[in-house]
Every structure is written in structure tokens, then in C-alpha cells.
Amino acid sequence: MNATQEPKIMPNTAPPEPNTYGTTSRVVQCHTCGASVVVPVLTGYAVPWNNSLVSCPTCAARESAAEARRRECERLDQRITELVALGDYSDATRRCWFKRSNPAVESRNPTAWQAIRAWDGGQNLFLFGPPGTGKTHAARCILNRWLARRRTVAEISSRRVFKADRLFDDRGALKRWQAVDVLLLDDIDKARWTEDALGALWELVDARCSNDVRTICTANVAWPALGELLAAGSPHNSALAESIASRISPAKLEFAGDDLRRVN
């Protein structure tokens, strides 16, 4: 540089920040409803996003809620798949939801269904009545409601309790059943109750009572008749059946009517 020349002052040409907003704005249409939306003009490295689809606040909230529902459905489906693999959930239960329940079926036993729909988990339940009157369906609706609320559930038969206790570990089944928030013990009157089987049932209901979690039982017989059936399985230990009954101590809901599964 010549000593007589003055140095040039270079203008400030620093590149813009990667994602800065410009000082101008433009009006675009919501890609869903067509409403006008004012958006800033992006500059810097964010320029390509100026052509992105835009949603108005109402549509954006609706889209966000739909995405949240989609993710929740995926989570629920994944959880159900896990329970089916464990044997703690049946494929038939997938179809049992209160929103899909048949009003004509509920009208046959309105008092019971009203109590089922209002159940808040405060007390164990005993659903009894003839076969095919909707007891298991109603109980499964409860399971799915609680499953959707991110609670733990399981559905088992009374026979499986005895098998899990005496024949095989069943991947820690007994421990799971002792702790889940809601356990459906279906057809409790159908097992061949022996003293050993009743001992396994007592361990299950005793642990659930201690854990303060809820059990739903279904049967074709009323509560007093179930007590007699259990007592007959343990003639040398009459207190065993009484102890089981006291630990369940359920609210009793009767289902009456004809077998809905019968084909005319």
C-alpha cells in the first residue's frame, strides 16, 4: 500500500444469523381452511422455509390434537400387543370399549351398566348372572378404559391362576397379577377348586388386598353360592374360603336375561 493512500473502510458485510426473522411480513392462506394468516418473512439460512405450508391457530391446534391422539393410539396398540404376548389380554377384548357398546344390550341390565360406567376403582366388583348376558364384555370395557388411562391391567381365567402357581412360572405371571391396577378374574366359578387351588387364589387376592388394587370377578352364580362352591373345595380348612371372600369383598352387580350369544 502506498504510504500516501488512506486505508479503505470496509462496510459491515457479516452474514446474517441462520434463522433470523426479517422486519417485513406477508399474508398467506391456511393450507387447511384457507383463512388469512400473517407470517414473518424469514431471512438468512431459513429462507427456504418461506414456502412452507402454514396453518391458522385454530387448524394448528386441531392438527396438534390429532397428532397427539395418533401417538396415543400407537402407544395403546403397542401396550396391547405386549399384553397379548404375555397372555394377559385376549383378542376379543380389543373390541370391548364403552363407546362401541350396544345400547340395546345395556338396556337389558341398566342398573348394572350404570354402575359399570360410573366405576371409579374404589371397590372390587363381582358381576354375576347367566351365561351370555354381557358380564365379561362389561368387565373388559373397564379394562380398556383403565388401559387408555395408562394404568396396568390383566385378564385371566380362574383356572390359569392355579396353573401358574403349580405347573410353571409363566414369566412371572403371579407377581404381575398381584400388582396390576385392575385384574379381571373371569369365570371364577369354573375352576376345579381344591385346597391347593384355593391356596393359590388366596395368595393372589391377599397380595392384591395389601397392594390396594382392584379385582373384578365374573361368575354364573351369585355371591353366596360362590362361597359355598369355594368352601366345598377345602372341607378341612373352612376358613380359607371365608378369607378369600373377605379380601375380595366386592360390590355385587347382577346381569339377567337370555344368552346374547345364542344363535336363533
Image: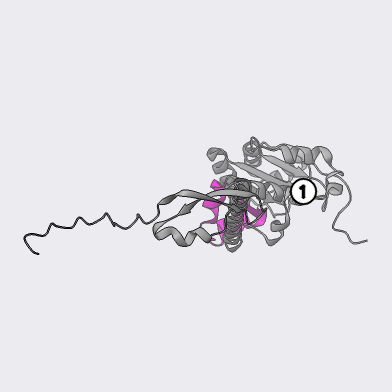
Q: Is residue 45 left or right of residue 57?
A: left
Residue bearing mark 1: 135
Decide which of 214, 244 is in the foreground and name it: 214
Classify 156 as above or below 121. below
Q: Residue furthest left?
A: 3
Q: Residue furthest front?
A: 4
Decide which of 15, 176 is in the foreground and name it: 15
Q: Which x, y percent locates residue 192?
A: 69, 55
Q: Is residue 171 in view from this perspective?
A: no
Q: Which x, y percent locates residue 146?
A: 63, 46
Q: Which x, y percent locates residue 38?
A: 56, 48
Image point (82%, 52%), residue name: 131
Q: Quadrant of the C terminus?
A: bottom right
Q: Which x, y percent locates residue 102?
A: 82, 50
Q: Residue furthest right?
A: 264
Q: Check if residue 85 falls in the magenta segment.
A: no
Decide which of 48, 212 is in the foreground and name it: 48
Answer with the quarter of the image where residue 114 lies.
top right
Label 1 secondary element: helix
Query: What segment is highlighted magenta in the picture?
Result: 154-180
Answer with the quarter of the image where residue 262 lies.
bottom right
Image point (84%, 47%), residue name: 103
Q: Check if residue 179 falls in the magenta segment.
A: yes
Image point (22%, 57%), residue name: 10
Decide which of 133, 130 is in the foreground and name it: 133
Residue type beneath disc 1: Lys
